[in-house]
Amino acid sequence: MTSHTDTQHIVTRFAPSPTGRLHVGHAWSALMAQDAARAAGGSFRLRIEDIDGARSRPEHVDGIIEDLTWLGVTWDGPVIFQSERLEFYAAALDRLKALDLAYPCFCTRADIAASASAPHGPEGPLYPGTCRMLDSQKRAARIATEPHAWRIDMARAVARTGPLTWVDADRGMVAADPVAAGDVVLARKDAPTSYHLAATLDDAAMGISFVLRGNDLFAATHIHRLLQALLDLPTPLYRHHPLLIGPDGKRLAKRTAGISLQQLREGGVDPARLSADLRACRFPVGISLGEA
């Protein structure tokens, strides 16, 4: 298996979801990824992760383009939309099914919540594996009549790959621990794929060699490393940067008032000054750098 970190051409990306306007935390991450590529003479790509049909909106896509353009962020090549790549996610899921590494899950959120005594992972209570225990006949009968998600059989998958590692630019060599996440969802009942599967496949397809993203996604990288091994995909270099923290001590979100790029622009903020401040880790009043 090859690694994009072995090549000289650096390719980074910014991959927002069109579920609201961008905030200064997005701006910081986008600038960081763009600057890393430009400094190395590489490429910077833009991907729109619009697979959440219930929350993704075309007007938010337009807003993302508008905000990035105002900030002075430029990207190479066409914008990639996950909604146009559904066949690739389906093919990867079929491959995992054929390897007997994915199983249908019929549990509702309420069912899972009722099993809250299960061990906790990075994203909350681990799925207790209820549907993993179903025999093939019961699975087939229920698939035909009931809504279902698809989960990875984590224990079986890890047994297949053996120990895995990946490299973080700040932390060095990291031993992958996907088991800590449990049997994560690969395709949801209301969406043809999950963030984990789609992001892993897209990074490989786009030739991304250096993934810069927030520290809140550090746990996800353990899962993505496993999927790369299972699907024979290259492993990029990663960097998980600290998050921006608002005056309430919580990380910034799209719903946080007053710090969207749209609001800053409408308030007369100079985008060149904002970009320079963010690059120097000087953030708008009331916003600070969280822990790595």
Image (cartoon, helix red, strand yellow):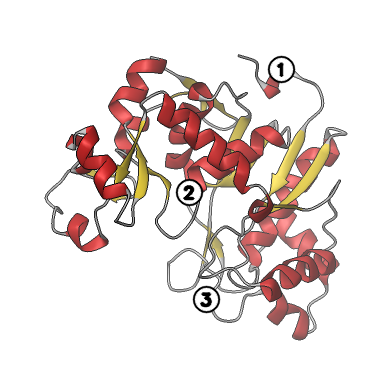
Crowding around mark 2 (Cα neighbors within 10 Å: few <14, some 14 to 19, many 20+) is: many
| For residue 103, above or below residue 82 | above
Q: Earlier in the sequence, mark 1 or mark 3?
A: 1
Task: Residue at 78% x, 61% y: name it.
Answer: 275
Depth check, front residue: 147 or 175: 147
Residue type, label 2? Ser
Point 65% across, 19% down: residue: 3
In this orientation, does residue 252 appear? yes
Direction from residue 31 to residue 43 in the image, left or right: right
Q: Give whichever of 247, 211 is nearer the camera.
A: 211
**Where residue 285 appears, x then y in whole percent?**
61, 74
Q: Is residue 173 visible from the viewing direction of this image?
A: no
Q: Secondary structure at mark 1?
A: helix
**Residue 255: assigned label:** 3
The tag on residue 6 is 1
Q: Which mark is residue 194?
A: 2
Q: Amino acid at mark 3?
A: Arg
Mark 1–mark 3 distance (CA, rounded to whole Å): 39 Å
Q: Residue 215: percent from the left, percent from the top?
A: 50, 46
Horizontal side of 116 relative to 30 (left or right) equals: left
